[in-house]
Image: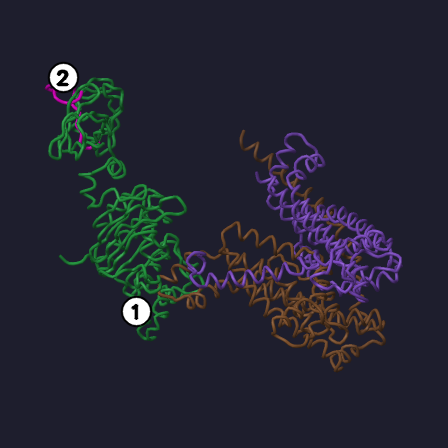
Amino acid sequence: MLLDFDRLGAWRWGLIGVGTVVMLFLLLPIVFIAALSFGDSQWLVFPPPGWTLQWYQQLLTDPVWIDSLLTSAKVAVIVTVLSVALGLLASLGLARSTFFGKSALQAFFLTPMVLPVVVLAVALYAFFLKLGLTGTLTGFVIGHLIIALPFSIITIGNSLQSFDPALEDAAMICGAGPIEVKWRVTLPAIRLGLFAAAVFSFLISWDEVVLSIFMASPTLQTLPVLIWSTLRQDLTPVIAAASTLLVALTIVLMLLVSLLKRGTRS
Amino acid sequence: MTTPFLQIRGLRKTYDQVVAIDHVSLDIQQGEFMTFLGPSGSGKSTTLYIVAGFQGPTEGQVLLNGKSLLEVAPNQRNIGMVFQRYTLFPHLTVGENVAFPLRVRRRPEAEIKAKVEKMLELVHLAGYRDRLPGQLSGGQQQRVAIARALAYDPPLLLMDEPLSALDKKLREEIQLELRRIHQETGVTILYVTHDQEEALRLSDRIAVFSQGKIEQVGTGEELYERPTSRFVAGFIGNSNFLPVKVEQMGSGRARAVFPNGHAVEGAASALAAGSEGTLMVRPEQMRIRPAAAAAGHGLAVTVRDMTYLGDSMHFAVQTPWQQEIAVRMAVRDGQGLSIGAPAVLEWDAQHGHVFA
Amino acid sequence: MSTALSSAAVPVRRRFKIGAESRGVKLLLPALLLLGGFFLIPVLTLLLRSVMEPAPGLQNYVELLGSQTYVRVFFNTFMVAGVVTLITLLIGFPTAWLLAVLPKRWSQLMFAVLLLSMWTNLLARTYAWMVLLQQTGLINRVLMAIGVIDEPLALVNNLVGVTIGMTYIMLPFLVMPLHATLRAIDPSTLRAAAICGASRWQALRLVLLPLALPGIASGALMVFVMSLGYYVTPALLGGTNYMMLAELIAQLVQSLLNWGLAGAAAFVLLVVTLGLYAVQLRYLGGGRTGFGGR
């Protein structure tokens, strides 16, 4: 009865009440900053006295913001490609082999996900100081790649698990070479997993703050680093505009994923 | 006349526009084993769930000892129930599962302990008190569920296809136990199944459900010997249906003709003369004789197939209007028949039933 | 004939398998090199510095656990993580429950909101709470307008702000797995409890909660561990007076260049995180959820 919606009696209204409040709580900040980004109050008065696009204008005409946006995009794209490539190789290697210590290795591949990012950030920072990699694109890419890779390995590994390796044998019997088998049989079968891994990797790199704060230099910074350092000084509505653009990007990516899922199901 | 133990009165349940059950009415006597039999979606489970209180009816009334059950929450109805899946509490031991209804009723510890022992003995699981449900077989789990449902001596036990997840052998074993438990405890049982054999084996009376309505209520013998509708005749036992035209309606009997003009009589009720109908005869109540030996009575047919089944012979015969009919006879009565030969098909008039 | 065929087939099959194995190991190399060179070595080096700088010994750990300031940081960290976990559980359980019983179209809508919140940029969400919670922010003005308070409450630059912001961020991480646990429970089990005579409260206490316990425990553990290591949200909402462990580590490196002490603090955080993660794997069946705090 407690798991039958229409026989919950008075409790149903209790649950609906809590659920509604929680949904409003989750939506409030997102809707709020979107509204603020169009408001003309420098001091973030809500509701705003009037409406304006000036914060978006400031954002998109300021070369510092544009540069950081481009850096973010560049890093995220490189990380996405490398993360999917390395993740694919690693999950193929894990799925198709048995050797001593395999599960330990598997656990090792996933530890960057478990570890507090600040520990990794500080450790990498020290390491990169010696190698002269702080403030470089390479530094950003390596840092982001380390935390994106576990998600990539998990996602691709999951889709490989539901792929029957006998299909590869079948293709081989038909005369296809090992590379051709991967290209014509395996990759198409796990393309959804690859796509999901790419989306995850992109979002992780795109949103990454902690590592980036330590990798950044005054001349090279990503969008989140710029938001972070601006936020430490004041709460300008320009950040509301930047945040709203980020939310919009998230929604677009979410819709893309759900459309793709629906497309493959039907 | 005393009030029936459980009365189901004009029960109706609709979901959105779909009618799940439509004016179901039934009286059940104390101590009776009543089975709801029907195909899936016929409304038998919905009726049971309304009695249990998991669903409310759109219309109608359920009375236990003359008092309405509908206002009472399921946990206060004091009814026992066994579900299709075993629904034991997986985190509690067998003993704690059986004790559960007594604990929520805050019975004294000593009473609980004694009762659990007694119930586990009743279902022959005395040594299993400290096992977890996951360690038991399906049949054992279902017996624990029965023990749990009877632990608080409910006057009424509901069973929703309790044996459908078990294999045939186990099913028959537990059917025997159910009969014994019913006799030992005297509890009134409402039992839902889609298996006609199970219904015949267990029940005092059977209510046959079809499309949200009760088609007929009666003992197994009544349903088999005197079905009142084509659906009941088809659902219980094997049957042949032959097309007829009603010629004349008497008191409880109709005179009808086959497409080839051959006239027969059969039990019937309220049929209009001149209407199209169906004559039903059970395969084992028909006889075939070689055409040469027959004296002109009966329906002329051709033998199409003969199968030896050990204790009986199975025949497929073809009527003049090209319909195949199944006949079952004792092996020695089939002497002189051969495939392809003309024959005569006969039955006693009392075994023919004419339906609309 | 058939025996000849099968005996010929077996070695071929074996050779193929061995080939696949060695090739498989080669495929692992790029990831292994990356994580070995840029993850394992740097982290181990940092931990090593905690016992090597400024001089070999455990003095960094003595200082960390002996100083009032640092003990205060530990206290803040564990308290905020504990309170956040508790609040998240209290509102997350009914939410997950509702999600599990709601008709599909409504539960899909709720899921979309949860996912949107989860995937929205962390800084964007934190920024929103900074604005909402400030002295002249919406929350204070609404509370004053309806007469609950006369003067604005201090909701940011203290642990209240951190707790609100962290609860917001952690909620989806609890609701999602807990929802999966609740969905896996057969509703008939609860019907059985009701027909056995259990009231709603009894069914909740004796059946639903015990059955949901593994999900509750692993969800709570995950929220707790993630909260311990979070950096961005506590730093922005907590201000400078209320520091948490992750922020301390960053400060020690960025402002004080005290690598030894930072290494020690990182080691403590690491041990607690990995220890609780091991508990999760060992007793609660793990699952594949990440802990890594931002």
Q: Quadrant of the C terminus of chain A?
A: top right
Q: Position of residue C50 (x, y in %)?
A: 79, 72
Mark 1 element type:
helix
Disc 1 to disc 2, how far (Cα)? 71 Å
Give the green chain's letter.
Answer: B
The one nearer the camera, B292 or C163, is: C163
Q: Residue at x 65, y 43 (%)?
A: A192
Q: Is residue B144 visible?
A: yes
Task: Give coordinates of residue B341: x percent, y percent.
Answer: 21, 17
Q: Which chain is purple?
A: A
Q: Place residue B280 in its image quadrant.
A: top left
Q: Which mark is residue B115?
A: 1
> Mark 2 sits on what residue?
B292
The residue at 72%/44% (across/down) is C23
User: Quadrant location of residue B312?
Assistant: top left
Mark 1 or mark 2, whichever is nearer to me: 1
Specify start and end residues of the magenta stretch as a single range: B283-299
Tell me: residue C86, above or below residue C103: below
Quarter of the picture containing the N terminus of chain A is: bottom left
Discs 1 and 2 carry the same chain letter:
yes
Verify whether residue B285 appears in magenta.
yes
Chain coloured brown: C
x and y percentages locating residue A29 in the rendered image = 67, 61
* Type of the residue with mark 1: Lys
Total marks drawn?
2
A171 horizontally vs A220: left or right: left
Secondary structure category for the residue under label 2: loop
Where in the figure is residue C52, as x and y percent of width and height?
83, 73
Please say whether residue A24 is one of the residues in the magenta stretch.
no
Q: Tell which subunit mark 2 falls on.
A: B
Q: Quadrant of residue A205?
A: bottom right
